[in-house]
């Protein structure tokens, strides 16, 4: 038994099927992309690499590079850009291939940007790059980043039982969580996020009807607004120190 589900934009016809047992699902088969690929994407990537990477990238023309869309970008768009094989032998210190991240509007913003919603992202990306805890940064521009491209394998269920790999992962996450990052250290935004999400949900949907339709017994028995107020009260009373964390590791 499986449930068919569509992914991506409304005009995206790609779909996958959820198996009855989630462990049987092959997540590598998913194509996760946001938005349409711009018609001039090869020209844009070529111009960025020409301007930021230097070396042989300044001597090649647009027909000497390869550009393709990368899956996995649910907030931004990701593209692979590489020199053709016959030009790679000319490379010295410059990269022969990169990943280009193009910013799109954020799904979630902590309002801590004072007019530049990507400022915090840039600060974090640079620090993680310098500490070798994130992709090496080759270029920063108003609309995105040029990063090192890594041949990689996603961390899947079968890796959870690899003790050596899990230990290495834990050490890297600990280094991330102990990093002092020069961004605002307050938790007020999370309360606004709670309230705004609650208000938006009730404006868009008849949640009580959805609870009954899906038989969400817990949500039917409890008042979600009261639960959010309780949670905000607990967060305030705990007065925990605020630290940097990775909240998007899956």
Image: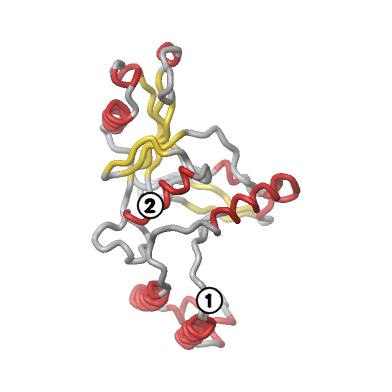
| Vertical comparison of 75 with 98: above or below | below
| Vertical comparison of 104 with 221: above or below | above
Label 2: element kind? helix
Label 1: element kind? loop
- For this view, does 10 lie left or right of residue 236? left
The quadrant of the rendering that contains the C terminus is: bottom right
Query: Residue 99: x percent and y percent?
Result: 42, 35
Q: Looking at the image, is mark 1 or mark 2 earlier in the sequence? A: 2
| Residue neighbourhood size for the residue with mark 1, other residues' Cα within 10 Å, grouped as few (<14), some (14–19), many (≥20) | few
Q: Which residue is mark 2?
A: 123
Query: Residue 42: x percent and y percent?
Result: 31, 29
C-alpha gap between disc 1 and disc 2: 24 Å
Is residue 205 visible in the rendered structure shown here?
no
- For this view, does 66 lie left or right of residue 180? left
Where residue 174 sits, quadrant-wise, is bottom right
Q: Residue at x 46, y 86 (%)?
A: 229
Query: Residue 222: x percent and y percent?
Result: 54, 87
Query: Residue 108: x percent and y percent?
Result: 38, 62
| Residue neighbourhood size for the residue with mark 2, other residues' Cα within 10 Å, grouped as few (<14), some (14–19), many (≥20) | few
Q: Residue at x 66, y 56 (%)?
A: 20
Q: Which residue is mark 1?
A: 240
């Amino acid at each position: 038994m499986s449930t068919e589900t569509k992914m991506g934009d409304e005009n995206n016809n790609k779909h996958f099927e959820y198996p009855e047992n989630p462990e049987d699902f092959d997540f590598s088969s998913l194509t996760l992309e946001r938005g349409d690929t711009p018609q001039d994407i090869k020209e844009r990537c070529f111009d960025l690499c020409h301007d930021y990477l230097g070396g042989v990238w300044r001597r090649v023309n647009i027909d000497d590079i390869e550009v393709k869309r990368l899956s996995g970008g649910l907030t931004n768009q990701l593209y692979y850009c590489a020199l053709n094989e016959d030009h790679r032998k000319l490379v010295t210190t410059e990269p022969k291939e990169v990943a280009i991240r193009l910013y799109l509007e954020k799904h979630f913003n902590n309002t801590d940007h004072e007019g530049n919603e990507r400022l915090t992202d840039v600060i974090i990306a640079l620090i993680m790059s310098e500490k070798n805890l994130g992709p090496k940064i080759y270029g920063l521009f108003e609309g995105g980043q040029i990063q090192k491209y890594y041949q990689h394998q996603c961390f899947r269920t079968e890796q959870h039982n690899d003790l050596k790999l899990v230990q290495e992962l834990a050490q890297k996450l600990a280094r991330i969580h102990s990093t002092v990052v020069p961004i605002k250290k307050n938790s007020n935004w999370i309360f606004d996020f709670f309230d705004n999400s609650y208000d938006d949900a009730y404006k868009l949907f008849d949640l009580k009807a959805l609870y009954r339709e899906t038989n969400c017994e817990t949500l039917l028995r409890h008042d979600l607004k009261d639960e959010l107020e309780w949670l905000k009260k607990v967060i305030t009373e705990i007065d925990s120190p605020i630290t940097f964390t990775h909240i998007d590791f899956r």
